[in-house]
Image (cartoon, rainbow, N blue to C red):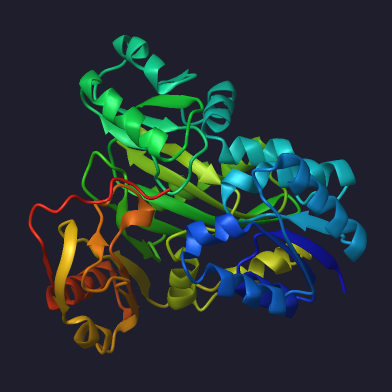
């Protein structure tokens, strides 16, 4: 039975890995668990420890301790591989130590070329793939000096934050200080990108790579919320196989080839412009926002388990989509929640798989500025096409009635 050291494996990942014959030693950071799960984080980690074959806690921001924890876990478990397919912020050091030990699933360089937005954009420019105008600055204060070379609006973003944090459509240089304040709220002080604003429908390509061969599991259509924040208000999985979606998928595969990616999941975002598809960004992990659940709903394909089969050298065998999987996000006016109704009625609808509204009376509904500040979601099952899925999501939103206190300051950001 192969041994695998995994950094921040979610509970579902441990179960899926064990079904594919792996023994899992889990490494987690309590602070990262609190960021993801809030108050229940301690219980979540106890459950991870109970599931895993080995378990360690470490501060991911303490580079020396984090590296030593990986080395010790490999030594004690006799691990065949070290793998990290969780949050990008702690991923690079894990791959560097894995490479040092000869246990890397992918080279650190290939992971950096996908996860780091500047490294990816530079790679694409150097390879002549998906060309677009961009520039980089060491700090947000340096962005104003770059804008003369661009036509406004432009997209500004940190190079290494995930979950749409700090990505902003800049229409006026006067907005820069407010954007810089938001970055500071996330604790981000690193380099930033300025990119031309791409217009067109947006997709993501979900792939699994086995021994350097990239398998397209499917294409997800992304439904963007109000600008200037690039926060999706929903996803539709099971896009029809058309010439356009084929071009989108082929471009994602071209990026993975250029990066030298060898094994595991990737999630690549693409905008289909009037001049053809252009890559927005990519990550060396499964898609977030419950996209794996949409794949399961639409195809009956368990991509979480399949990524461990990929690690074992077994190619995925997804079937065609039987229905459209849809997640729709809830969005209400920000403020203190005074009353809410209709949640139970919406949850009882026969096409609702999961409905989450994690707020109680007295809680603050924050302004939605990233994926962590949305107000809940609904996952739908059994939709024949996108139109039916969207109509069903609208039905859920119509049922849920929320009253908030007018004029109440909303939370500015969630890290």
Q: Nearer the viewer, residue 198 or 359?
A: 359
Q: Nearer the viewer, residue 85 or 197?
A: 85
Residue 40 vs 257, above or below: the answer is below
The reply to whether residue 16 is visible in this rendering is no
As drawn, the residue found furthest toward the left would be: 406
As drawn, the residue found furthest toward the front would be: 362
Quarter of image, res 96: top right
Quadrant into which the N terminus falls: bottom right
Q: Nearer the viewer, residue 109 or 279?
A: 109
Q: Residue at x 39, y 34 (%)?
A: 183
Q: Residue at x 52, y 60 (%)?
A: 34
Q: Nearer the viewer, residue 369 or 304?
A: 369
Relative side of 253 to 150, left or right: right
Q: Position of residue 353 (x, y in %)?
A: 36, 82
Q: Position of residue 167 (x, y in %)?
A: 36, 37
Relative side of 268 to 210, left or right: left
Relative side of 70 to 358, left or right: right
Relative side of 93 to 89, left or right: right
Q: Position of residue 108 (x, y in %)?
A: 73, 39
Q: Residue at x 42, y 61 (%)?
A: 289
The reply to whether residue 236 is visible in this rendering is yes
Q: Position of residue 406 (x, y in %)?
A: 7, 57
Question: Total number of numbered labels?
Answer: 0
Q: Residue at x 22, y 81 (%)?
A: 343
Quarter of image, res 352: bottom left
């Amino acid at each position: 039975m192969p041994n695998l050291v995994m950094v921040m494996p979610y509970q579902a990942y441990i179960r899926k890995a064990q079904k594919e014959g792996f023994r899992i030693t889990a490494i987690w950071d309590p602070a990262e668990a609190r960021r993801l799960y809030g108050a229940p984080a301690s219980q979540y980690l106890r459950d991870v420890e109970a599931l895993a074959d080995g378990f360690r806690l470490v501060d991911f921001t303490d580079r020396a301790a984090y590296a030593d924890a990986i080395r010790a876990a490999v030594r004690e478990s006799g691990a065949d591989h070290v793998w990290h397919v969780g949050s990008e912020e702690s991923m690079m050091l894990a791959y560097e130590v894995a490479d040092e030990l000869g246990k890397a699933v992918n080279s650190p360089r290939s992971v950096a070329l996908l996860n780091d937005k500047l490294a990816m954009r530079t790679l694409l420019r150097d390879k002549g793939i998906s060309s677009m105008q961009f520039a980089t600055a060491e700090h947000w204060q340096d962005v104003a000096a770059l804008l003369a070379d661009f036509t406004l609006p432009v997209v500004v973003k940190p190079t290494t934050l995930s979950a749409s944090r700090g990505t902003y459509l800049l229409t006026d240089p006067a907005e820069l200080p407010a954007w810089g304040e938001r970055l500071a709220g996330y604790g981000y002080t690193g380099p930033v990108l300025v990119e031309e604003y791409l217009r067109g429908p947006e997709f993501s390509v979900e792939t699994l790579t086995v021994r350097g061969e990239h398998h397209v599991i499917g294409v997800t259509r992304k439904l963007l919320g109000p600008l200037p924040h690039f926060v999706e208000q929903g996803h539709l999985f099971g896009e029809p196989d058309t010439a356009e979606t084929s071009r989108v998928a082929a471009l994602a595969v071209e990026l993975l080839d250029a990066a030298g990616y060898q094994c595991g999941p990737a999630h690549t975002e693409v905008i289909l412009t009037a001049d053809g598809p252009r890559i927005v960004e990519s990550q060396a992990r499964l898609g977030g926002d419950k996209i794996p659940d949409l794949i399961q709903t639409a195809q009956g394909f368990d991509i979480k388990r399949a990524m461990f089969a990929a690690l074992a050298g077994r190619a995925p065998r997804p079937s065609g989509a039987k229905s459209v999987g849809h997640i729709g996000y809830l969005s209400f006016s920000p403020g203190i929640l005074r009353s809410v109704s209709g949640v139970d009625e919406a949850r009882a609808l026969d096409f609702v798989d999961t409905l989450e509204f994690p707020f109680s009376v007295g809680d603050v509904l924050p302004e939605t500025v990233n994926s962590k500040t949305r107000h809940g979601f609904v996952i739908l099952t059994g939709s024949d096409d996108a139109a039916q899925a969207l109509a069903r999501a609208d039905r859920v939103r119509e049922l849920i009635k929320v009253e908030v206190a007018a004029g109440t300051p909303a939370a500015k950001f969630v890290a």
